[in-house]
Image: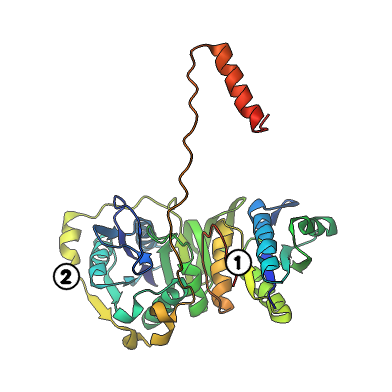
Amino acid sequence: MKICVLVKEVPDAAVEKRIDPSTGRLDRSGEKNLNPYDTHAIEAAMQIREGGAVEVDEIVAVTMGPESAVRALHKAVSLGADRSLHLSDAALAGSDVAATGYALSKALEKEQPDLVLLGQQSDDGECYTIGAVVADHLKMPSLTQVIQLDVQDGGLRCERQAEYGYDTVQVSLPAVISVGDAINEPRYPSLKAIMGARKKPLETVATGDVGIDASEVGEEGSRVQCGEFHDPEAKAAGQIIEDEDTDETVEKIVAWLDERKLI
Amino acid sequence: MADVLTYVLHYEGKLNKNSLGAVSEGAARASEVGGECHALVLGGDDLSDELCQSIGAYGATKVFRAKGAEGLAQPIIDAMAKVIGEHGHSYALFGGGLLGFEIGALGAEHLGGAVGADRLAQLVR
C-alpha cells in the first residue's frame, strides 16, 4: 500500500491571524509550522504501517505552497514519512479551496496512492473541505472526521464522528480520508529523525510537471472572490452585579432576566 | 432560475436545527433575487409527509423527498445533482456541522460550483 499524506505549512498557533487587506488573503508572515491537524494524519499512516495488517510500501508527504513550505515537509518526514512531494508555483498563489483541491489532486495523480490521508482542517483557513474536493477529482470515496481507522477486508473500516454520534463505515480503496484529532496522539520526532529529515528525498514540481491547467488555479482560476473584510462587531461589555446584599443581588438578577424575557 | 436548494438533515424523526437555519437563510436570500427556496431530504420510511411538510414553516416552498442511505455525503450529492439538473437551481446552501462541510465541499466540486465554509452571511448575486 502506498499512502500519501497531505500536509500544510500554517502560521504558528501563537501568531494572531489576520487578513491582509491588500491581497485579500490570510497574512502568513511570521513563524510557521506544520499544521497540527496533519500530524494526526501522519501518525495514522504510521500506525497502519506498524499495525502489520497490510504492508505499507511508502508514506509520502505532499504539500502545495511556497518555498518555505519545505519546512513542513521536513517535519512530516521527521514524523515518519519516507519522502515528500512539494507542489510549488507562483501560479498557484491565491487559489481557493476548489482550485487548491484540483491542484493537489493532480499532484496525487502522479503518485497513484492507495490511500490519501489528511487532517480534518488547517489551522489557518479552517475550511474542513479540501479532502472532499480532492476525492471528487480523483473519483475516490471520501470520508471526514474519522477517529478510528482499521485495515479490514481489503478496505478500511472507519469510525467517524457524525452529527448524532458515531458511524462505522466500510470504505473501499483507493480512498481519501480526513482524520479527526481524536484519532491518535501524534508521536514526537526523535532528534535523529529531525536531523535525518533533510536527507530524505524531496521532489519539487511545478504546475506544468503534473498537468495542472494554470487557468484553473491561482486567484484568476478561483471561483470564490474575496470581497470586503472587517473585524467582527465588538461585544458590549457585560454587566457585573456585586453581591453585597444577597437578597438585593437576586432581585437584580431576576429583574435582568425578566427584562429580557428569559424567565 | 434564481432558486436556492438546501439540504435538510434529520435524525430519529426530528429535523436538524442547523439545516433548518439554512432553509430560513435560503428563503431570505432567494426572495432578494426573486427566487424560491426548496429543500431536499433523504432517508427511508421515517420521512413522513408531516415531517417533510414541516420544513415549509421555515421558508421552503417545495420539498424533495428522496429515498436513500442517510449519513453519507455521496447519496445526498447524487440526489441534489438530479434535482438541480431537473430544476436548475442556481445556489445550494448547507447548514454547518460535520456532514455539512463534507456535503457542501463534495457537492460544490461535483456540480462545478464555488465552495465557502463557515459563512456568517451568504451573499447571493
B89 versus A81 height, above or below: below
- Given the image, what chain letter belongs to the residue carrying mark 2? A
Report if the CB atoms under discs 1 and 2 are less than 8 Å apart.
no
For label 1, the crowd category at 10 Å Cα-Cα, with few meaning under 14, some 14 to 19 and many 20 or more, is many
Q: In which quadrant is the N terminus of chain A drawn?
A: bottom left
The residue to which callout 2 is attached is A199
- Whole-percent x, y for residue B6 in the image: 67, 65
Note whether residue B112 is visible.
yes
The foreground one among B110 and A243 is A243
Identity, as a three-letter code, of the amino acid under mark 1: Ala
Identity, as a three-letter code, of the amino acid under mark 2: Lys
Q: In which quadrant is the C terminus of chain A drawn?
A: top right
Which corner quadrant of the image does residue A21 belong to? bottom left
- Given the image, what chain letter belongs to the residue carrying mark 1? B
The residue to which callout 1 is attached is B73
Tell me, yes or no, whether dots 1 and 2 are on the same chain: no
B106 versus A125 height, above or below: below
Q: Secondary structure under badge 2?
A: loop
The foreground one among A153 and A97 is A97
Circle number at residue A31: none
- Whole-percent x, y for residue A205 in the image: 28, 81
Note whether residue B8 is visible.
no
Count the marks: how many?
2
- 3D distance between C-alphas at marks 1 and 2: 41 Å
Residue name at image x 29 percent, y 50 percent = A14
Using residue A59 as the reference point, say whether residue B24 is left or right of it: right
